[in-house]
Image (cartoon, grey):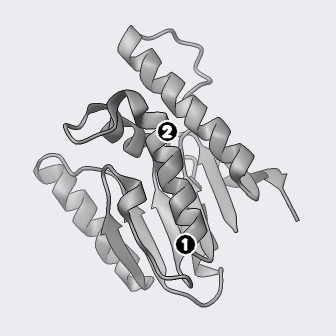
């Protein structure tokens, strides 16, 4: 089962996704973290989150680029957090996919889907503010939009979390 969870910043989507994993039944809980911890504050934040997830029996795997190289057990229950960080990493990191970002991320998520029992993917809704940004930011938004649309098509379930309230967008039985 593949469930895509989206929402704006601070919407509660991450907590919602973690709770879905906790209720997904038996299997190894794996948290794929995509945020690169820049600076001391970033490292402290990551460490705090890692400790909180450990209490929930998550194994954390850090993956900033190259999602397709990951290998997990068939009984895995994977939470990928989040596609917006992964997109920026693939676009701008030295070992990233650069112009092939969309394809690399979709290939990686398809690989995860084929390996594990349940896959929960968190992404951000960054398209509704109506602001026109500089060319590079618009390229990032276009890539993330293409990825989100493709993931929504592939997903068995799509949920948008709005003000802490999950709103079902898609559910395939």
SS under mark 1:
helix
**Horizontal arrangement in the rendering, residue 32 relative to residue 143 (left or right):** left
Quadrant for residue 55, please give it: bottom left
Q: Residue at x 58, y 20 (%)?
A: 129
Q: Which residue is drawn at 38% across and 43% down?
A: 85
Which numbered circle lies on residue 161? none
Q: 29 or 92, which lies in front?
A: 92
Which residue lies most toward the bottom here?
A: 26
Residue to which mark 1 is pinned: 115
When the figure is inspected, residue 124 is found, relative to residue 100, above or below; the finding is below
Q: Residue 93, can we see it?
A: yes
Mark 1, Cα crowd under 10 Å, few <14 / some 14-19 / many 20+, is: some
Image spot of residue 38 (x, y percent) = 17, 46
Task: Count every numbered label the image shows and give the total.
Answer: 2
Q: 151 or 107, which lies in front?
A: 107
Q: 119 or 130, which lies in front?
A: 119
Mark 2, Cα crowd under 10 Å, few <14 / some 14-19 / many 20+, is: few
Residue to which mark 2 is pinned: 103
When the figure is inspected, residue 18 is found, relative to residue 138, above or below; the finding is below
Instruction: Tell me the quarter of the image containing the N terminus.
Output: bottom right
Nearer-N-terminus badge (1/2): 2
Image spot of residue 63 (x, y percent) = 32, 58
């Amino acid at each position: 089962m593949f469930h895509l969870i989206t929402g704006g910043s601070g919407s509660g989507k991450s907590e919602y996704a973690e709770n879905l994993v906790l209720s997904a039944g038996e299997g190894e809980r794996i948290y794929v973290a995509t945020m690169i911890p820049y600076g001391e504050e970033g490292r402290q934040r990551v460490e705090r989150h890692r400790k909180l997830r450990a209490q929930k029996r998550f194994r954390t795997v850090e993956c900033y680029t190259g999602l397709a190289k990951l290998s997990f057990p068939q009984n895995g229950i994977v939470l990928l957090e989040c596609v917006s960080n992964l997109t920026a990493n693939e676009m701008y990191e030295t070992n990233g996919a650069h112009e092939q970002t969309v394809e690399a991320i979709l290939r990686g998520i398809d690989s995860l889907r084929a390996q594990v029992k349940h896959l929960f993917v968190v992404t951000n809704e960054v398209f509704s503010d109506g602001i026109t940004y500089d060319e590079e930011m618009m390229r990032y938004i276009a890539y993330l939009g293409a990825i989100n649309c493709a993931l929504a098509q592939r997903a068995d379930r799509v949920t948008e979390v709005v003000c802490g309230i999950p709103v079902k967008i898609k559910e395939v039985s």
